Image (cartoon, rainbow, N blue to C red):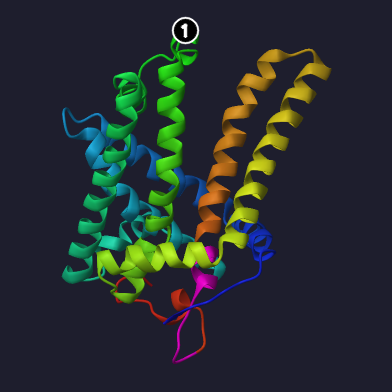
Amino acid sequence: MKLNIVPARTGLIWVKLGITTFMKQPLAMSGLFFMFMTVLSLATLLPYVGAALALALLPAATLGLMAATQEATKGKFPMPSILISAFRAGQQRKQAMMVLGALYAMGFLGVMAVSALFDGGEFAKLYLVGGKLTEELALQSGFQAAMWVAMALYLPLSLLFWHAPALVHWHGVTPVKSLFFSFMACYKNMGAFTVFGLAWTGIFIIAILLVTLIAAMLGSPLLATTVVFPIALIIVTMFFTSIYFTFRDCFVDTDTGQSTADSAIPPGTA
């Protein structure tokens, strides 16, 4: 396995593949994403440990959606059981994924802890526990500072974990090494990932503007509020579908010359 450097325009290809693959299996991918969100939401309801548990499950759940995307590219209908692929690949890899999940939870909670230094924990509490975001709270300088600090710190955290679940699951890379390889792959392909991120941001903004414009032309504000949420969910599902292709193109198997996700599939995931 070696790192593959791709041109910046590949970011647009990833977006296109995410959309076209979703369109091949829209019901399956939408249903799996809904299950993905439901499981994480239910986990947060557990007292005391709910938020941490949901964070710890996120790498494994994301891997499940990547495995579902891989199935869809082969023309297969991904079944719900594919979401637990991370826990069906043998004891060693299951334990490694659990360690990875724990590291992600610790990292994210660490980011929230640092942000709490700027506003006394108001932003962290709202994000982790929930609550109502009032205009007064949003305008507080401390709250805004905490939000921007959290966003700045989350970026390197997301790069560390972007490819890590796939590396652990499909290649048996240790959790710590997977973080290093993931960060380097994102760093070396920063041009493609920048285009990737900007493209998805643009798609989301354009979709919201179109819905708002149509609702205004029809004189129906209720239409905008009714339609925006499902459209946003579809776009987010397409985004998660496209994540698989970022991993597939960033690593190449040195023996076969194939993308790593296609050449290394552990038992129990096909």
Q: Residue 265: x percent and y percent?
A: 37, 77
Q: Nearer the viewer, residue 92 or 116?
A: 116
Provide residue 263's location: percent of width, then percent of height. 44, 82
Seen in the picture, residue 122 relative to 63 is either above or below; the reply is above
Identify the residue under disc 1. 136
* Residue displayed at 65% across by 47% down: 198
Residue 173 place in picture, x, y as percent: 29, 73
From the viewer's perspective, tell me whether residue 117 is left or right of residue 238.
left
Q: Residue at x 36, y 62 (%)?
A: 164
| Residue type highlighted by circle 1 | Glu
In the picture as drawn, the residue positioned furthest to the bottom comes out as 255
Q: Quadrant of residue 203?
A: top right
Residue 264 % position (x, y): 39, 80
Q: Quadrant of residue 83?
A: bottom left
Q: Quadrant of residue 254?
A: bottom left
* Secondary-structure class at tag 1: helix
Residue 132 or 229: which is nearer the viewer? Answer: 132
Please provide the residue range marked out in magenta: 245-256
Does residue 90 show up magenta in the picture?
A: no
Residue 257 visible, this orientation: yes
